[in-house]
Amino acid sequence: RDWSSDVCSSDLDTTTQSPTTANAFQAVTFTAASVSGWTYSGGTFTCGQSGLYFVEYNGQAESGTTSPITILLRLANLTLNYANPNTMASITLTAAYQPAPISKSFLAFFDAGNQLQIQLSVSSAQAGLGSVSGVPSVSCTIIRIQ
């Protein structure tokens, strides 16, 4: 089977993303988008075809302090006003300026028209997703498998 025709989004961003409010989820934005079968606008992906999807996101977490800071990433279905806890990844950082990977992969069913966001929350505004030497601060791939 040629899976390449079913890739719905393979997006990345190389900017630093730091929430201004601690412990509140905000949309992660993507500046480089290669979307097929989905639409993307202002941090929101809209599903073009119902089906079972493989979803994977990766982030480069970084903190500006040695105090413990927790960073959370999740996928939220805005249409259903729901964020499944099984779509969430977390990491606690205790070293300043030491990037650490945060990632999650899972299967999920989406209906056509569902609006999805990758969202970020940090326990302190001194942390977020950082870009190191042009490495993506966050990337997301969504592939329809059925």
Image (cartoon, rainbow, N blue to C red):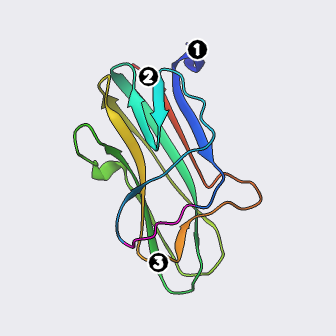
- Disc 3, disc 1: CB below 8 Å? no
Q: Is 7 displayed left or right of 89 in the figure?
A: right
Q: Which residues are magenta?
A: 17-22
Quadrant in the rendering for residue 112: top left
Instruction: Locate residue 31 relative to residue 122 in the image: left or right.
Output: right
Q: Which residue is located at x 72 percent, y 62 percent?
A: 132
At a point 67% along the width and 60% down the height, the residue shown is: 131
Contact between marks 2 and 1 (CB within 8 A): the answer is no
Residue 112: assigned label: none
Q: Badge 1: how crowded within 10 Å, few (<14), some, or many (20+)?
A: few
Locate residue 60, reporting x and y percent.
Answer: 60, 60
Mark whose residue sits in front, 2 or 3: 3
Residue at mark 2: 145
Residue with the mark numbered 1:
2
Q: Which three-letter amino acid code belongs to the residue tagged 3? A: Ile
Q: If you read the primary sequence from the N terminus, does the residue marked by circle 2 or circle 3 appear first?
A: 3
Three-letter amino acid code of the residue under disc 1: Asp
Decide which of 68, 31 is in the foreground and name it: 31
Q: Secondary structure at mark 3?
A: strand
Q: Is residue 134 left or right of residue 9?
A: right
Query: Quarter of the image containing the N terminus?
Result: top right
Residue count near mark 2 (Cα–Cα under 10 Å), binned few <14, some 14–19, many ≥20: few
- Write the residue at 24% across / 46% down: 82
Residue 139 appears in which quarter of the rendering?
Answer: top right
Task: Point out the residue furthest to the bottom here.
Answer: 67
Any magenta on residue 107?
no
N-terminal-most mark, 2 or 1: 1
Query: Gap between marks 2 and 3, in whole Å?
Result: 36 Å
Count neighbours of disc 3 (C-alpha within 10 A) and say few if under 14, some if 14 to 19, many if 20 or more: many
Say above or below: 124 vs 107: below
Amino acid carrying mark 2 in the image: Ile
Q: Position of residue 42 (x, y in %)?
A: 47, 42
